[in-house]
Image: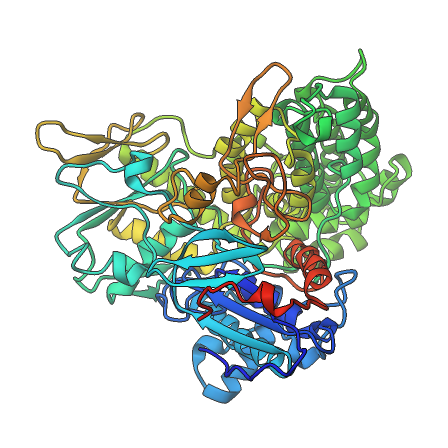
Amino acid sequence: MTTPRTALPDGAAEPYRLALVGGGPRATYVMERLSATVGRLGAHARLEVRVFERTGEFGAGQAHSPAQARTSYLNRIACQVSFAADESTPGAGPLRPAPERPTLYEWCRRTFQETGDPDFDLRPEDWPKRHVHGRALSEMFRAYTADLLRHPGTELHLHQAEVVDLAPLGRGFEVVTADGDRYRADEVLLLTGHSFHDPGRAASAPGGRTRHVPHPYPLEARLGPEQCGPSDVVGCMGMGLTAIDTVLHLTEGRGGTFQPDSGGGLVYLPSGREPEAVVAFSRSGLFTFARPDNHKPNGGDHPGTFLTTGAVDLLRAHRGTPASPEAGAGRAQLDFERDVLPLAVLEMAHLHYVTLFGPGTALLLTQRVLPHWLAFLTGGPAAPRTGDLLAPLERAADEIAEVLDAVLRGKQAVFTAERTVGWPVRDVLLHWVRTVYGASAAYEVRRCVDRSVAPSAETDGLESPCGMDPSVHGNRFDWQRTVSPLPSCGSAAEVRAAVLDFMARDQLWARQGNAGNPHKAAADGVWRDLRGVISYAVDDAGLTPASQRHFLSTWVGHHNRLANGAAPEIMAKIIALIEHGLLDVGAGRDARVRVDEATGRAFVEGPHTGLRRPVDVLVEARMHGFDPRLDALPLYRSLLDRGLVRLWRNESPGGEVFEPGGLDLTAEFHPVGADGSADTRITVLGVPSEGARSFLLSALRPHVDHYVMRDVLVWLDGFWRAAGGRRLPAAVADDGVSNR
């Protein structure tokens, strides 16, 4: 789309030319702020904006395309997705009127009233299909661009084209597309999002008779019946969100259906058009855990008791190792497993027990561990070892359980117990019963307590409807079992049974919610709500090079399983497919791909289970970390070759270097070139900065001062300083370059 260009009046400024490379969700957020603040454009200034999106899906991009498979879902509920700045972000004004900045839920309600399409008939806590998010992004992008064009000094051009290079030209660039067109730009904003690795550069293709799919998106094009037919066995490398999309597309997307069974689960009814089997495998042998139902209000994230930015600062001051001046401005570096992980585990355990026993025990639990925590932070001679941090917390949990057990058995009256301990025994008992057995059991126990009758008469023999241990001494926090719930060995059939057993229990925990279930509260409260604190410790060379390498290869995966999984209803479909037998998870932990040299066929092998299954198609169903050297798209390789960008490095004083793949950027997200200077004409937001930063894959969230919008505002402030009153004499503007 190109808006008509009007003739420049005598003495009018040449336009300031902005190129947005990438037209996905971040382009929507940028366009929202750009149009809302376009009044900063000077009275006689002009602005020309070009947006380049290779898929033509402006506002959504490929990953969020409105045309994508109907079997793919967001892993965030509808009320926690937005498209515009709000009051929570300092300095974001002017803000739009509330009706012009709906959440995804509000947009869906309006769209359902207009269309009657059941995909839009959502409640605030429902999990939307991803095409719904794509449609909303596209619509909001169109609304914001229309708003931008109301300013008489602006024009907009949308190009369905892949940008392959930025060629320096005078004060700006030529934006070069794959079809050879060139467009002038004074400033370029790179919003390219995720790509994938070129198999030739990454040496990941198995070769031989097995067909290799290095990236499954778009699913309809890469995994259609002609690529994966009914007679094929498909190897699915990865068991995260991308793998779940892949599995559901190859099953439900081929016409299979899920029907409720008598036990509250689902049964899969195949269509006959699915592949013969899908063999899913990964290092953990587990799909991501089910995201819990959200029972927290907006802005109700867990604030952190022990894992805080202040604690990280103390760790760095007392336990950190000196860093290279080039890494993180010379600040001391941490080791994640030695320094930060113990705080994360302590925070999880504390939140687990507060959720299990109730807020009446929070002070006791906090006071017991506080001296050990402070000693750990300061790293003195008496500092506890990592494994000892939880000991006082466990002892406190034992004491609470002993008191509750005595009251349950009628060995001690509530009022007697409350005179000997410093916490409200009656409230804690009722909270524990409600958590383990449910509200009706808590009602009966309360009646027993009020009548001085032993409550065990009501609880003995009851099963927990939410998969909890019925013993008052049960439900203990266990970090190792949390991150590795599968047995270390066993046959493929035994591992399959263990996976199903864990997933069934995980479903019940997820349904109890992120505020009611101790296991889910701990995982959600730390690895999701406190993700910013973890980033504070990790980002910008906060870890030693060796520790950062291990963090990215190991702990990001644990984060994804613990806190970034799919909705319970989606995981119920995965369970049904495993139970049906179409989805094979028998490879277990540490599975790998081997190629038979004689036949050229790839096999999925489970070293601990003995599984060895040949596959006809191997799908890399996992997201690749950004690395321009391996990227399937040429843009960043071109920028590297020109010296316009360089890789970010984490370097220790001893000379150890780690290059995760991200670009070296300034605090304002301008790339640092090969010569060490920053180019303020280019700004990079999102995935390409993930070498120095972590956890960057996220849709905009309302009411929480979200980092995605903060990043946009950093760019916007510099942009308006440059573009607000730009005037160029004709001699400078007329450089003979075609300006399409």
Q: What colour scheme has been applied to the protein in the rendered image?
A: rainbow
* Image position of 426 with respect to 607: above or below: below
Q: Is residue 480 left or right of residue 614?
A: right
Task: Judge by depth and name the residue closer to the eye, 98 or 164.
Answer: 164
Quadrant placement of the N terminus: bottom left
Q: Is residue 429 left or right of residue 145?
A: right
Q: Position of residue 499 (x, y in %)?
A: 38, 41
Task: Judge by depth and name the residue closer to the eye, 238 or 218.
Answer: 218
Q: Position of residue 193 (x, y in %)?
A: 48, 54
* Image position of 590 with respect to 91: above or below: above
Please identify the residue farthest to the top as the structure is shown. Answer: 381
Residue 435 visible, this angle: yes
The residue at 13%/27% (across/down) is 597
Please identify the residue farthest to the left as the structure is shown. Answer: 598
Q: Is residue 491 left or right of residue 405?
A: left
Residue 399, picture quadrant:
top right
Quadrant placement of the C terminus: bottom left
